[in-house]
Amino acid sequence: MTPIASPRPRPEPVRLDFPHTEPPVAGKPMEVAPGILWLRLALPYALDHVNLYLFEDAGGWTLFDTGLGDDRTRAAWDELCGTLLNGRPITRLIVSHAHPDHVGMAGWLHERFAPPLLMPRSEYLLSQLLQRQRTPEVEAGEAAHYRACGVGEEDVGHLLKRGLNYLTRTTGLAHSNRRLASGDRLSIGGRDWRVITGGGHSLEQAMLWCEADRIFLSADQVLARISPNVSVYSMEPQADPLGGYLDSLAELGAMVGEDALVLPGHNLPFRGLPRRTAELTEHHALRCERLAVACGEAPRSCAELVPVLFPRHLDPHQLGFAIGEALAHLNHMVSTGTLAVGEGGDGVLRYRTL
């Protein structure tokens, strides 16, 4: 399918303020604010890193996110336990959301230090669910979901194999969890933090806001250089995560000022969050406009619309994210009355512009 031109040109990227022009060397933390260490660990993806944050706290460290549960990350944590921590334990573990690059080492760290685990309830339960062995019924449901999106049988087979990745890139979870909910207050490292949660990239991603010191831990909800993946999955095929994500961006843009230091889950720390949330909102509006043009020409399946948003070759790993992201935009447009969806005799859902 020939990529569809945008109905209006893409705006120039906004200018953000970066207090650090270079990240820390992987596994070698640096102080990013008084009492807060920025730790970067490697990932085996195109997005090749994840940011974690350590807070000097009473009797030890509070850790925000864990890294991927693979051998390279285990080796990095083994070294950190002998150097950075210097005999001081991790006394509290905060996990922002259930994606394996953020929760992957939670089980390993629990075995080592037994810190209390703090996670949003839905993120904790989702991670527990995904760490169970896959059943034939689960795979059959996923296959039916991809077929309804118009995915061919060969690609369906490739996409089903992606589900095994979660089991190999996580190390379990503590049996109990202290629920993090929006509006909760935490005292960490002598600062008062407010918990903010937001949907879209995950179900109920936790972020931390210290209004007094103007520091905001955004996890993956707002990143400086990339748009977080916002996807629909087979367990809830008619969900509208993009609507939740746009609501979250509006809330954050109004709450967190231009002067706040944003500590994200990927990319560099920055200032200028309202500029970035406005840019991300516009980014998704342009994507919806491109889909509306394509679906105005003829009814199209989700798989047929993937090249409209991703006009490049995609490997199976990237294709799974692309289908989920395209479907998130399509579901949002159906919910807002921009598109209609119908099922043909072949069982494939197709979308047309109203």
Image (cartoon, grey):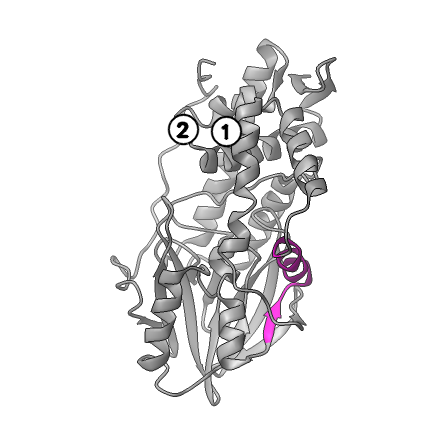
271 left or right of 241 in image: left
Marks 1/2: CA distance?
Answer: 8 Å
Q: Residue at x 61, y 10 (%)?
A: 298
Note whether residue 284 is visible. Answer: no
Q: Farthest residue to the bottom: give it.
A: 59
Q: Is residue 154 above or below residue 239?
A: above
Circles 1 and 2, Cβ within 8 Å, touching? The answer is yes
Q: Is residue 329 above or below residue 105?
A: above
Main secondary-structure element of the magenta-colored stretch: helix
Question: What residue is disc 1 on?
Answer: 286
Q: Which amino acid does label 1 sit on?
A: Leu
Q: Which amino acid does label 2 sit on?
A: Arg
Q: Position of residue 105 (x, y in %)?
A: 48, 65
Check if residue 351 falls in the magenta segment.
no
Query: What range of the chain is rendered magenta?
Result: 117-131
Who is closer to the viewer here, 5 or 273?
A: 5
